[in-house]
Image (tube, grey):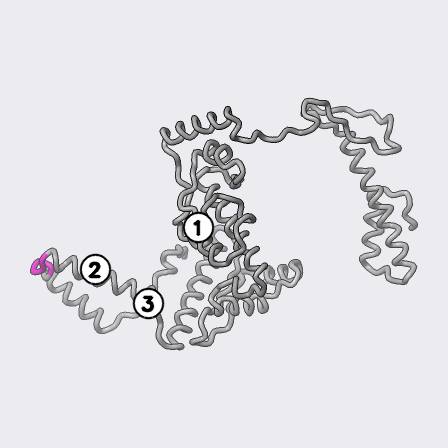
Amino acid sequence: MFSSFDKLRTVQRQPNKFNAYLHHIAKENNGELLCFLTEEQKNEYVEELKVLKETQQYGLRLTQRSRAQDVNHVCKTIEDLLLGLQVRVGVQAFYCVVRSSLEYQLHPRFFFTNRDLDVFLRGSVRRFEPENIGALAEAFSIAGSDYLSFLRSMTEKVTFLRGEVRELLNSGLASPSGDPNATMSYAQYTRDVQLKYKLTLEGWMYSTLCAPSDLPAIIPVLMDIHDHLVRGDCYFHRLDPSEYLALQAEYEQRAESGQVKPRKKRSDAGKPRAKGKQVAGEVGRASTPRGDGIDDNATTTTTMAMARRMARTATMAMMRRMAHGRRGRRGRRFLLWVTYVGSQHVVH
């Protein structure tokens, strides 16, 4: 019988004496007891029930046994949901659960909807060992999930924080602009960000807006900028039409007065550029250009010439390896590949 995901999540409890008593009282009175309650009392009882449910869902488990039972119960529910989803729509999934506290014992727990997926990943992905991954994830979680604590030198910490600030700014710009490829511009901030996307950065902590690589190598300063971006105190705000027009007029005035540096032009701007060099031995071969301006024969000719050069290099390397008696399975595979690309120097 089909069982949806919401039914799997609902815990089917066994009836007990207290629930049976409440059911009996409600059936006898047919809801008449509610008539003696005021609206304030009813709302108070509803709030008490909400607090009780939140406590049951997010309340801290105090004993080791209760914590382990809670983890096992939730993992079993997740596994049932994933297996049901696999049957209904056809998906494969895996997860890893590790503890983040030393107050109770729990080994890293893994689950694969298909054992063949585990075997495939172990053989295809280099060093994919769920046991080692779980041990590393557990150590990182117990340490407080603080990546900076694993960086030893000051240079590594500064580089990491600058990279995080850069990624947060780019992702913060991509979301409100609607352009997933949007990147933050610092030298031309007004033109490439404010005027292009009609957005402005609010809450920037440093005195001037500059690239993360130009920020001072001071950990507290970088941490403040990073934390403001994570909390949302520093964000991109959409400009009003009046603000945008005023900013555009100011930018044009600055550009006319020469305060804005124009984009540097190429040294060969306006001049026809030289075409790519032809490969020796391919002169005189006819080519038929496509309608999109790309020459199919020329592209194929260049690709084949590169393949021949790579084949000759690989062939010489394989011959040296065979001379030392280290041919093996990979050597045979390379020779077959060299033969396929059409090298004329392969010795069978």
For label 2, the crowd category at 10 Å Cα-Cα, with few meaning under 14, some 14 to 19 and many 20 or more, is: few
Give me the residue at 84% from left, 60% from top. 328
Residue that carries the numbered disc 2 in the rendered image: 47
| Residue type, label 2 | Glu
**Residue for point 51% across, 61% down:** 95
User: What is the C-alpha distance between the residues marked 2 and 3?
Assistant: 16 Å
Viewed as shown, does residue 110 lie left or right of 343?
left
Amino acid type at mark 3: Gly
Mark 2 or mark 1: which is in front? Answer: 1
Q: What is the secondary structure assignment of the residue under circle 1?
A: helix
Q: Amino acid at mark 1?
A: Leu
User: The residue tagged with tag 2: helix, strand or loop?
Assistant: helix
Crowding near the residue tagged with mark 1, few <14, some 14–19, many ≥20 C-alpha atoms within 10 Å = many
Q: Does the magenta run of residues contain 36?
A: yes
Which corner quadrant of the image does residue 123 belong to? Answer: bottom right
- Image point (42%, 63%), residue name: 77
Query: Over which residues does the magenta segment extend?
Result: 34-38
- Relative image position of residue 122 (x, y in whole percent): 63, 62
Instruction: Assign the N terminus to one quadrant of the image.
Output: bottom left
Q: Local crowd at mark 3 within 10 Å, few (<14), some, or many (≥20)?
A: few
Q: Which residue is mark 3?
A: 59
User: Are the residues at dot 2 and dot 3 in contact (C-beta closer than 8 Å)?
Assistant: no
Say if mark 3 contacts mark 1, CB within 8 Å: no
* Residue underneath mark 1: 229
Asked whether, in this view, residue 126 is left or right of residue 54, the answer is: right
The tag earlier along the polypeptide, 2 or 3, is 2
